[in-house]
Amino acid sequence: MNASTSEQSLFLLKMRGPQTAQQLAALLDITSMGARRQLEAARDKGLVAFEDVADKVGRPSRRWQLTPAGHARFPDRHADLTVELIAQVQALFGDEGLDKLISARERSSEAAYGKLVDVRLDLAQRVESLAQARDGEGYMAHAEAQDDGSVLLVENHCPICAAATACQNFCRSELAIFQRVLGGDCTVERSEYLLEGGRRCVYRIMPVDVSSAGL
């Protein structure tokens, strides 16, 4: 099996979610048979699984997606060590000590993002700058401009997922941090959440309608 193509297949499933063999074949510029072989080999390793989804017309389509083992192929910032350190901090310093640690991390993140996001730029450019910062931290992030004027900040991976699962306070203030960094002319809401069963985390950034704000 071509290692490069197999890794690309896993990467595409991570970034795009469930795909058919035909869709992967088109993205990888290989035959449908070649894509199926890649997927079947990955299934034999426990990295992917499929679900047959009934379409409106015709027979069900087979959609492939990553298993937990497949997701684990991507960077996790030494998950086991992180979870162990969280437990030790909590044991030594209690919930208050852990809260101080998380608050310090939040201040550091906000300061770093603030240096990279120029509030004088338009909203799409600001979100793009924030996405680049998050991508550099391992979140596999990108920005998507929408027809209604909003912009999505899409994070296909969570490099601190193990830590966030062990202590969800690690995610508690991301919305507030993003809001402060992006400025007061927009609102930020989370539309998909990995820890609530979503495939990824997605934040919807909406411009504030200044004309109606004073009504």
Image: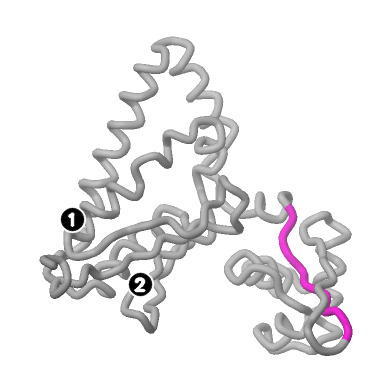
Amino acid type, residue under disc 1 in the picture: Lys
At 39% from the left and 12% from the top, the residue drawn is: 93
In the rendered image, the vertical position of residue 139 relative to residue 39, given as above or below:
above
Q: Position of residue 13 (x, y in %)?
A: 66, 68
Check disc 1: other Cα within 10 Å, few if <14, some if 14-19, many if 20+. few
Left or right, 181 with reference to 69 = left
Q: Which mark is residue 129?
A: none
**Mark 2: amino acid:** Val
Q: Which mark is residue 151?
A: 2
> Could you say which quadrant of the image residue 59 lies in?
bottom right
Cα–Cα span, label 2 and label 1: 20 Å
Q: Which residues are magenta?
A: 59-67
Q: Depth check: 152 or 97 in front?
A: 152
Q: Identify residue for label 1.
A: 115
Q: Give the residue at the far front of this rendering.
A: 215
Q: Residue at x 41, y 75 (%)?
A: 144
Instruction: Name the side, left or right, on which 15 lies relative to 116.
Output: right
**Could you tell me residue 116's position as x and y percent?**
22, 60
Front position in the image: 72 or 95: 95
